[in-house]
Amino acid sequence: MSASTKLSTSVKALSFLALENKPKNSTEIADAVGINASKLRRLLSLLGKAGIVKSDSGMLGGFTLNKPPNQIHLQEIYCAIEDRKAFYLNVNDDNSKKNSHSQKVNYFFLNLFSDIQVEIENKMTDITLKNILDKIN
């Protein structure tokens, strides 16, 4: 699953939980979001480890938000589900010689991607789950 798909799916699931305001099991969330329940459980597990959601077992158990939507930032969600940055370039696989034209181009993109990543994460820090809910409702 791509980074943008994982982020979008996670936000859909969290939005569903915020609107439902009661525990929901992974099958209910998956049905509402339109994703396979096992893929969703992997995302919910990552979100749980980050403290964004919590799960309670038992008959009335399920997943709920661990904090209010206005305290859940898009950047926090992104960092919880991603093990790689949005813009990534693996220069270790490049067999070009040091200081070659190819290597210089790689370093140009490394610096560019680093700057873009910082801008993206700063922008996502300013957006909360509540902001998203307000915009779509």
Image (cartoon, grey):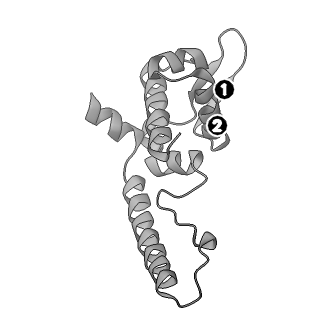
Count residues near mark 2 (Cα–Cα under 10 Å), then give few for <14, some for 14-19, many for 20+. Answer: some
Identify whether 116 is placed above or below 86: below
Quarter of the image holding residue 38? top right
Identify whether 97 is placed above or below 26: below
Mark 2 vs 1: CB contact within 8 A: yes
Q: What's the residue at 44%, 64% (across, down)?
A: 117
Find residue 14 and report its horizontal and vertical position in percent. 48, 31
Which of the marked residues, 2 or 1, is nearer the chain's N terminus?
2
Find residue 104 and report its horizontal and vertical position in percent. 47, 84
Q: Residue furthest top?
A: 59
Q: What's the residue at 42%, 55% (across, down)?
A: 125
Quarter of the image holding residue 20? top left
Q: What's the residue at 58%, 28% (across, down)?
A: 40
Pick the front one: 66 or 82: 82
Identify whether 109 is placed above or below 123: below
Q: Amino acid at mark 2?
A: Gly
* Residue of label 2: 48
- Whether residue 111 is visible to the viewer of this picture, yes or no, is yes
Q: Which element is circle 2 on?
A: helix
* Residue of label 1: 55
Identify whether 71 is placed above or below 64: below
Q: Is residue 5 left or right of residue 43?
A: left
Q: CA distance from mark 2 to mark 1?
A: 8 Å
Q: Is residue 22 left or right of residue 50?
A: left
Q: Which mark is residue 80?
A: none
Q: What's the residue at 47%, 61% (across, down)?
A: 87
Q: Amino acid at mark 1?
A: Ser
